[in-house]
Image: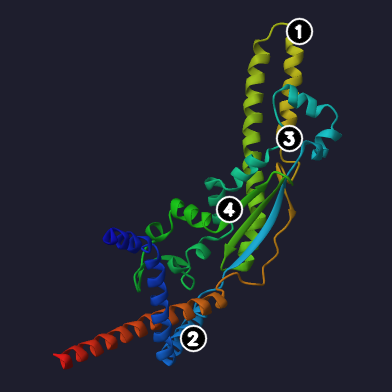
Amino acid sequence: MRTEHSSFHAESHGPDRPDSASVLLLSEILKAVLQRWRMVAAAAFLTAAVAVAASFAVTPTYRATAVYAPVTENQQSIPSLLGGTANLASLAGISLGGGATLQRIGALTQARAISLEALRKEGALPALFPSRWDAQQKRWVKSSGLFTLEANQKSAEPTPQEITESFELKRVVEADNLTNLISVRVTLQDPELAARLANRLSYYVNEYERARAREEARASIDFLTRQLEMAEQATVRDTLRQQLSAALQKATLVNARKDYIVEVVDPAIVPERKIAPRRSMYLIFGLLLGGGSATILALYFRRREAARTRSRAASVEF
């Protein structure tokens, strides 16, 4: 019975062993650090100094933010001035622009085709791929490891997939359903280009939708013209004439408004403060890396010395 009781008593203290082992380990680490604190401090400060120095070699990046808002139907001043044109357009099943949903505008702002066109026309490709652009020769080159190899324009220029994937990492679009606004943030090493892209993306979204509206108007005009030629009843022909008039007006009015479905309500300004590199983070990382590495080394030395001491004591007793 005593044996069973002592066994039960030993097992009941089993869960406390990890805690005591942790305390012993922390105590050993603290002793190792105190024993070799000069080495730990020197390693921490040296690594921190190297990290901070390395941060000066990193090219700063900047973030520009623009705020968009959908153009509502109430803002269509030109159709309203023309009297019944808007009503005729609705009758013909044609939209005069505006009234686009927040989700659609957000999706168009992130669309690959629109982004690709904007980046190419705004001359942003060298900023996205600086290592592959020779600024002096004004041409693309292939980079292979530490060496830069000359290549022709066709093979060295980034592909559309490379361009869109790179820009997706540098552009953030957030839609706020509560305020009905869209925030567009662009992060680049060139602050002026970042601000320009954040503002100009709305232009390419409008132009994309404007082109789609033109195609709709042309298709409607062609369809209504054919229907009018085949119609025989006077009432049907009158209705078709009204719808055709609306389609013709749409083809004219589609270019009348600058902001077709989206407008910039808060344009981005050229950022003056960089968002990276943050030298404080480099400093903290350097201190932790150097101090942690030196602590591990100090603990290793302490345990090796303890092992040697035990070995010598055992040999003396023997």
Which residue lies under the disc numbered 1? Answer: 234
Q: Is residue 168 left or right of residue 297?
A: right
Q: Quadrant of the C terminus?
A: bottom left
Where 215 sits versus 22, above or below?
A: above
* Mark positioned earlier in the residue sequence (4 or 2): 2
Which residue lies under the disc numbered 2? Answer: 49
At label 2, which amino acid type do we have?
A: Ala
How many C-alpha atoms fall within 10 Å of the one at disc 3: few (<14), some, or many (≥20)?
few
Q: Position of residue 288 (x, y in %)?
A: 47, 78
Which residue lies under the disc numbered 4? Answer: 118
Mark 1–mark 2 Cα distance, whole angstroms, equals 88 Å
* Mark positioned earlier in the residue sequence (4 or 1): 4
Which residue lies under the disc numbered 3? Answer: 252
Mark 4–mark 2 Cα distance, whole angstroms, equals 42 Å
* Mark positioned earlier in the residue sequence (3 or 1): 1
* Mark positioned earlier in the residue sequence (2 or 3): 2
